Amino acid sequence: MHILFLVSSMHAGGAERVAATLSKGWVEQGHQVTLVPTYTGKGKLFYELDPRVRLEWLADRLGRARRTPLAPLAKLRALRRLVKETRSDVIVSFLTNVNVMTLMATWGLKTPVVVCERTNPALSASASPALRRLRRWLYPRAAMVTVQAAASQAPMRQQVPGMRRLSVVPNPLPPNLPPPRSWGEAAPGRRHRLVAMGRFVPSKRFAGLITIFGRLAGRFPDWDLAIWGDGPLREELAAHVAQAGLEERILLPGRTATPWQELLASDLFVLTSEVEGFPNALIEAMALGLPCVSVDCPSGPGEITRDGQDARLVPLNDEAALEAALAGLMSNPRERARLGLAGSQSVRERYGLEQVVGHWDALFKDVL
């Protein structure tokens, strides 16, 4: 089977990493995959692709048109030509804007289109009102609409009532993920690290995490906090750290090209987001054997942690509960080890690449 896979870009990001992982899983099954980043600015390939995946930059087909006001129309024409040339059996599209463009470009063509929402549609601010109207109009033309978590199904049906099919397909764990960390006796004098990862934007609520760690810092003098990432709130967060007088213990080291190594070097992971689609950082931290604390935001953490069986799950907007959960694990190394090992086994069984590709196989059979 030939799969034409459309994504916005291949920059550093969760959807891009999933695109690289799924492409690898499909070609390993013997499928032919053409991966097409549609971003007019092209950009660079951040994640390594399996060499069997054909990479086709849509921007290369636009020429000078990508720098003119006619770029949107040129993209539609270029994409339609590409679809006809590849003669793929199925098209998979990631992200709302790419989904809308794909359904417009393939209007009247027979190739089935599977569109994939990457956030909870009821809470995401990534889609403009115009884009939401187009989604409502065009998604009923898709052969299948997928969301990442069961909690996103009802909002999706409410926003797009005429869909033919709706399915839940979770993100897969990367196939080259290292084995879980080992838990032994900590070396005397070793400092411990609480870690978080994500873009420095309001929805990640890192300012609140800094405040909470500031209250815990005196009780746990051998613990530090590292927040990996970058974004528009960097200066504001740095000022917040300075105001707390914790520059030596709260680190904002920026983006990392080795997130798994940073997680393996840590002792506890925390997710504080106001909303998620399906947090890759959480399932990867759990898979690597880190004990995790997560707020029960929509959507994803409840399902990933099995309602708190495999990690500490606290109510959204309850700072006291989040602080108590962190303190409970920071003070109990045996419970950290138990929770880390149990969480790792659970998510690897449910979200391994083989299991998720199996979900996709069933979906393709249904669509075709």
Image (tube, grey):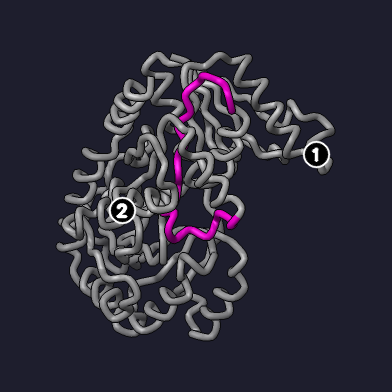
Q: Position of residue 9 (x, y in %)?
A: 60, 39
Q: Quadrant of residue 210?
A: bottom left
Helix, strand, or loop for circle 2?
A: helix
At a point 21% along the width and 51% down the height, the residue shown is: 343
Residue 312, visible in the rendered structure = yes
Q: Which residue lies most toward the front here?
A: 162
Name the residue tied to disc 1: 70
**Residue stretch in magenta:** 107-129
Location of the C terminus by quadrant is top left
Earlier residue among tags 1 and 2? 1
Q: Residues within 10 Å of mark 2 (few under 14, many from 20)?
A: some
Residue 279, visible in the rendered structure = no
Q: Position of residue 222 (x, y in %)?
A: 33, 74
Q: Position of residue 340 (x, y in %)?
A: 22, 54
The three-letter code of the residue at mark 2 reads Ala
Q: Residues within 10 Å of mark 1 (few under 14, many from 20)?
A: few
Q: Quadrant of residue 46?
A: top right
Name the residue tied to disc 2: 151
At a point 56% along the width and 33% down the height, the residue shown is: 103
